Image (tube, helix red, strand yellow):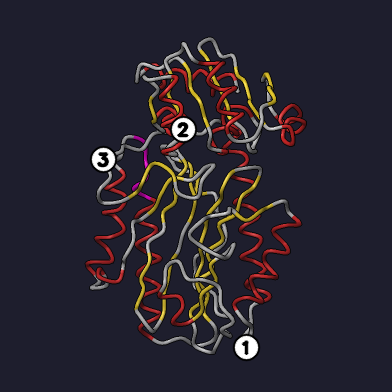
Amino acid sequence: MKQRRKNLLKFGKQIDCDTLVTFEPENLFYMTGFWGEAIGILEKGGNTTIIAPELEVGRAKEESENCDVITGERGVGLISSLVSKIKKNKICTDCNDFSIMTSLKKSIPKIKSSTEPFYNSRIIKDEKEIQILKKGSKIIDEMFDICSKKMKIGQKESELQTILMSYALNQQMFDTGYKSTLNPLIIAGGPNGALPHAQVTQRKFKKGDLVVVDLTLRYKGYVSDSTRTFAMGKISQQANDAYEIVKESQELGLRAVKPKVNCKDVDFACRKFIDDKNYGKYFIHSTGHGIGLEVHEVPNVSYRSETKLEENMAITVEPGIYIQNKFGIRIEDSLIVKQKPIVMHKFTKDLLTI
């Protein structure tokens, strides 16, 4: 935690700030070890304060590391307590709420709103974070093994989700709370698989389906993310050929991952192979993204990205092919960037036929 705070202050100094204020639970957790409804303050020298409503104070004291915990009334009371504590400092905050920032600027005219110090610190994982990500990835592999044993023709997508989430919860793996979906998992059979972010439905698996199973779950605060695609009985020749193309594309992407390599070059390695096989128009998303305390965080592994990979970044590599009204295929691993990358998922990428 001490090194994290040093890094946060270092990146804050780069934008002429000596104090960081966080409203976001991910950044609060990174800064303090406490995940909850509160405001975190990190001052020059490393002094760290949490301002929390009374209902959160007990947990904040118990879970945070080396923090002063101050009680403030919910809402306006927390803001008043914050202003009285930091009024004379050079402040950077991750708050992007217009009404809160308008209120703060009345008392602190030079306060800056920027996520840069937070994301610049979080982009490189420390050893504790890497170990948590590895453990979360191992549990996801176990869930893919459950898929291979429990999936069957006639089963509903929602029924498989229930089986998998029951296991996940028993392993202390939880829903990410990702705002763009109503479901904890993506389980998409047949034509539903052509929707990269498909909602889980009551559709039953049918013979000849490809089933995309995307498991994105949180373990001890950190998100692990992996996808496998299964076959329900004999599939079409086109589906089989497309699967092998995605598999080879993903392998090329994994081989491209190294420190100092540009993210767009990893995307290119995957995309060019799919393009060369005449499926380019069916690869409709970026090749990957950073993972950590959020499902999608920096760096973005896309053709637009100018970010260079650095050792101990955590990213995904996940090419796919999606043919409307027919099928979808995605193969995804989470990995730690090294000279020889650590691919955290060991479950087979050979096409398993159920």
Q: Are marks 1 and 2 in contact (CB under 8 Å)?
A: no
SS assignment at label 1: loop
The alpha-carbon separation of the residues under discs 2 and 3 comes to 17 Å
Label 2: few (<14), some (14–19) or many (≥20) C-alpha neighbours in 10 Å: many
Residue 258 included in the magenta stretch of the image: yes
| x and y percentages locating residue 16 in the rendered image | 36, 16
Q: Are marks 1 and 3 in contact (CB under 8 Å)?
A: no
Compared with 191, 10 (above or below) is above
Q: Which quarter of the picture shows residue 80?
A: top right
Q: Which residues are magenta?
A: 255-259
Label 1: few (<14), some (14–19) or many (≥20) C-alpha neighbours in 10 Å: few
| x and y percentages locating residue 131 in the rendered image | 61, 39
Q: Residue at x 35, y 83 (%)?
A: 238
Q: Which label is found at residue 118?
A: none
Residue wearing tag 1? 154
Main SS, magenta residues: loop
Quarter that holds the C terminus = bottom right
Which amino acid, mark 1? Gly
Q: Which quarter of the picture shows residue 148?
A: bottom right
Judge by depth and name the residue closer to the eye, 327 or 159: 159
| x and y percentages locating residue 8 in the rendered image | 48, 23
| x and y percentages locating residue 293 in the rendered image | 54, 42
Residue wearing tag 3? 306
SS assignment at label 3: loop
Label 3: few (<14), some (14–19) or many (≥20) C-alpha neighbours in 10 Å: some
Residue wearing tag 2? 124
The alpha-carbon separation of the residues under discs 1 and 2 comes to 44 Å
182 to the left or right of 243? right
Which amino acid, mark 2? Ile
